[in-house]
Image (cartoon, helix red, strand yellow):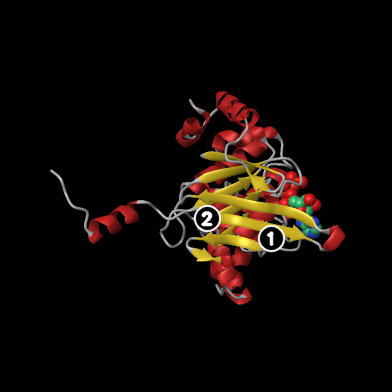
């Protein structure tokens, strides 16, 4: 049966194609001026879909952290456009950016950045308190989230009493306590041994499959040098010299292809990308 496409069916088609969670077009960023100018990003295009876990790889200095900072509204791009869930960061005031980051974005770094004088639960509760939740309910909710990263019993410990892997799990709990729609992780396993790194990636992978506070799908972007964790990605994007390559190199794909043999999970979407 043939059908003439009406306006209604055309918009139904558009509604079927989800808007990207992260949309980056032609983004440029230069640090410094004149003779000291360092071009960090030289026209980056990248999309991340809701529900997706994307890994960003590439040599030191190629612009990975800079791109992550622009995606998450920490840093302003010089040119191009960076949108998070349909809102361009450049269209917001500084206060609006701060609020949007607080409401929508969770951060995990290589350094765990825990406050040494606060207990583990208090550390995790900080983002909630910054959002206006009062102390007792914030610590209660933080303790629940610590349970989901296997640290419910350590809620009243001080950070220095925990191992590096445990501290990173606390940092993940802190990043997830506000149920963000975007989780960005900058080399989250760099300071951890292989097994601990794997358990941290399992948590980050699980977070990519959970819904955010708003009931929307979440997306996750992980910067890494660590090929051992590629198997947790839905897609691997490779950067070089301030650009995201159109296609990751054979070397990166070979590493992604090899890694599944070391265990699960290995996403079906990555299997499509590497040609399994
Ligand atoms: N605040 C800054 N001031 C000046 N230059 C900077 C600044 N931040 C980054 N750069 C420069 O911009 C380029 C990209 O840096 P970026 O930190 O994004 O790289 P990266 O890919 O994250 O590297 P790494 O793997 O070492 O973390 C580098 O040449 C770096 O020296
Ligand atoms: Mg970096």
Q: Is residue 243 above or below residue 137?
A: above
**Secondary structure category for the residue under label 2:** strand
- Residue found 72% across the figure and 42% down from its top: 190
Q: Is residue 272 shown left or right of residue 31?
A: left
Closer to us: 99 or 144: 99
**Secondary structure category for the residue under label 1:** loop
The CA span between labels 1 and 2 is 34 Å
Q: Residue 246 location, x and y as percent? A: 58, 40
Residue 100 visible in the displayed image: yes
- Residue ID for mark 2: 22
Closer to us: 240 or 237: 240
- Residue found 64% across the figure and 62% down from its top: 79
Q: Is residue 15 shown left or right of residue 184?
A: left
Tell me, for residue 119, which label it has, or none.
1
Asked whether mark 2 and ligand 1 are closer than 8 Å, the reply comes as: no
Q: Residue 56 location, x and y as percent? A: 62, 44
Residue 109 visible in the displayed image: no
Label 2 crowding class (10 Å Cα cut-off): few <14, some 14-19, many 20+? Answer: many
Tell me, for residue 141, which label it has, or none.
none
Q: Is residue 206 above or below residue 193?
A: below
Task: Indicate the quadrant containing the N terminus: top left, top right, bottom left or bottom right.
Answer: top left
Asked whether mark 1 and ligand 2 are closer than 8 Å, the reply comes as: no
Closer to us: 197 or 255: 255
Q: Earlier in the sequence, mark 1 or mark 2?
A: 2
**Residue 113 position by quadrant:** bottom right
**Residue 98 position by quadrant:** bottom right
Residue that sits furthest to the left in the current view? 1
Closer to us: 194 or 104: 104
Q: Nearer the viewer, mark 1 or mark 2?
A: 2
- Residue found 56% across the figure and 75% down from its top: 132
Q: Residue 227 location, x and y as percent? A: 65, 33
């Amino acid at each position: 049966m043939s059908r003439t496409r009406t306006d209604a069916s055309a918009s139904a088609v558009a509604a079927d194609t989800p808007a990207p969670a992260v949309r980056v077009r032609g983004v440029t960023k230069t640090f410094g001026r004149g003779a000291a100018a360092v071009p960090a990003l030289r026209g980056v295009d990248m999309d991340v879909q809701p529900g997706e876990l994307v890994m960003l790889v590439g040599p030191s200095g190629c612009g990975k952290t800079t791109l992550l900072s622009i995606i998450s509204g920490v840093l302003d791009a010089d040119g191009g456009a960076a949108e998070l869930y349909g809102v361009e960061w450049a269209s917001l005031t500084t206060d609006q950016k701060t609020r949007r980051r607080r409401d929508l974005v969770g951060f995990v770094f290589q350094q765990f950045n825990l406050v040494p004088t606060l207990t583990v639960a208090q550390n995790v509760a900080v983002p909630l308190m910054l959002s206006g939740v009062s102390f007792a309910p914030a610590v209660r909710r933080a303790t629940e989230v610590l349970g989901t990263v296997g640290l419910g019993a350590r809620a009243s410990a001080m950070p220095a009493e925990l191992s590096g892997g445990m501290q990173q799990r606390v940092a993940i709990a802190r990043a997830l306590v506000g149920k963000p729609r975007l989780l960005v992780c900058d080399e989250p396993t760099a300071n951890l041994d292989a097994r601990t790194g794997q358990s941290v990636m399992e948590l980050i992978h699980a977070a990519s499959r959970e819904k955010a506070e708003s009931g929307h799908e979440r997306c996750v972007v992980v910067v890494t040098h660590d090929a051992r964790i590629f198997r947790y990605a839905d897609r691997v994007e490779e950067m070089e010299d301030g650009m995201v390559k159109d296609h990751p190199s054979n070397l990166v794909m070979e590493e992604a292809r090899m890694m599944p043999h070391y265990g699960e999970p290995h996403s079906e979407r990555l299997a499509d990308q590497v040609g399994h």
